Image (cartoon, rainbow, N blue to C red):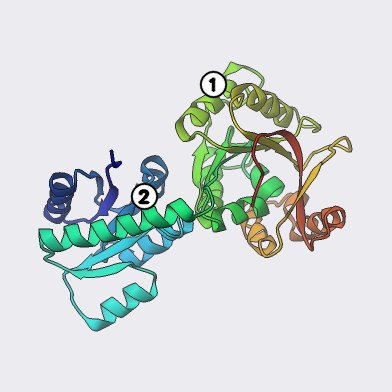
Amino acid sequence: MTEPYRVIVIDDDPDVALFTKTVLEKRLAASVVTLADPTDLIEVVHELDPDLVITDIEMPGVSGLDVIASVHAVKPNLPVIVMTAHASLDYAVTALRNNASEFLTKPVTSADLVTHVTRLVEEYRENAKNAPQQQVVLAIGAHPDDVEIGVGGILAAHSAAGDLVTVLTLTRGEREGGIKVAWNESSASAQQLGALLILEDETAGDLRSDPAIDVIKRVVSQIKPTVVYVHSKNDRNGDHRAVHEAAMIACGDVQTIACYQGSTSTVDFRPNRFVPIDGFLEQKLKLLACFAADGERARYLDADIALASARYWSRFAGWVDCEPLEIVRDASIVTA
């Protein structure tokens, strides 16, 4: 039996959204989620894993062209239909140049809607069969900026390859400004990656007990990662070691677990895989720049540290720039 089409519809006009949803559900037996605005779009994309997005081009405070960019940052090949009541050649050309799959003028007939959705979803699914298997990536850090320091380049490469990336941060850290600053900085980094951010503040000061394990287990159950990146046990920071230990318990069924070099890793950190990040180092530097931009900046966030580290580890692999990993489990190949 063919799996139902999964479609996200974004339109601030409730009548248009309801019409589109009703047609697709009744004519195609599709599973449809409607959004009045794209605020929660990335989270819904991660949860639904849609075959298609349909969006209005003009909404309060946001453009359908911005929606296309956000969607393709997470799923580069996902088809997007742009609809508008303002039919003009300029609108159509702009939309198609921004990688819209179709440009439709409202009102759209039910027959046309069904035809376009069927064609685009079937093409997308057929292409997906022949594409490399998509990785579901979970990067776990004790504090904001931990995963960007350790695997920022690898995560950027995963995202560029169309893999689904989630960043789980277990505490807000001790930076001035508390949870608000932690969220603003971390979400800015996650947005650049096209990643889903989960920032847990409940475990603050309690990383050495069951709450951290429970949080990681819950996230693993929700997203079902194929690859997990986490702190190394070879680290002088107690929070980092505690998160490593919690992840080892919570990620027992994950195919691949790899530990990254953090800002406080010790000389006992012994990588056995060196992943090339050529072409992604510049993006890693932009991720690091999201943190402590307006306050006192820790030395380990400096660009020259990241550059020197990437160049140093490349000597073991023959690439220009690398990030090192300690492989704990490798039931599949870690790719980036």
**Residue 75 vs residue 270: left or right?**
left
Q: Mark 2 and mark 1: span between their CA atoms?
A: 26 Å
What kind of residue is marked 1?
Answer: Asp
- Give how far across and how far down residue 143 sits, in percent: 64, 38
From the top left corner, tell me how far across and down residue 93 is, in percent.
Answer: 31, 79
In this orientation, which residue lies closer to the viewer: 36 or 28? Answer: 28
The answer to whether residue 42 is left or right of residue 179 is left
Q: Few, some or many C-alpha atoms within 10 Å of disc 2 (few <14, some 14-19, many ≥20)? A: some
Question: Quick check: marks 2 and 1 in contact, CB under 8 Å?
Answer: no
Furthest-front residue in view?
A: 1
Q: Earlier in the sequence, mark 2 or mark 1?
A: 2
Residue in view at x 28 percent, y 63 percent: 81
Placement of 83 over or under 184, stated as above or below: below
Q: Secondary structure at mark 1?
A: helix
Q: Residue at x 67, y 28 (%)?
A: 243
Q: Is residue 134 visible?
A: yes
At x 38%, y 76%, the residue is 97
Q: Is residue 217 left or right of residue 276?
A: left
Q: How many marks?
A: 2
Q: Residue tagged by mark 2?
A: 41
**Residue 74 visible to an observer of this rendering:** no
Task: Please name whichever residue, 45 or 65, is drawn nearer the observer in this view of the structure.
Answer: 45
Q: Residue furthest bottom?
A: 89
Amino acid under disc 2? Leu
Question: What kind of element bears circle 2?
Answer: helix
Res 1 quadrant in image? top left
- Locate residue 19, reporting x and y percent: 12, 52
Foreground: 278 or 206?
278
Instruction: Give residue 214's mark.
Output: 1
Residue at 70% across / 58% down in the picture?
A: 277
277 or 42, which is in the foreground? 277
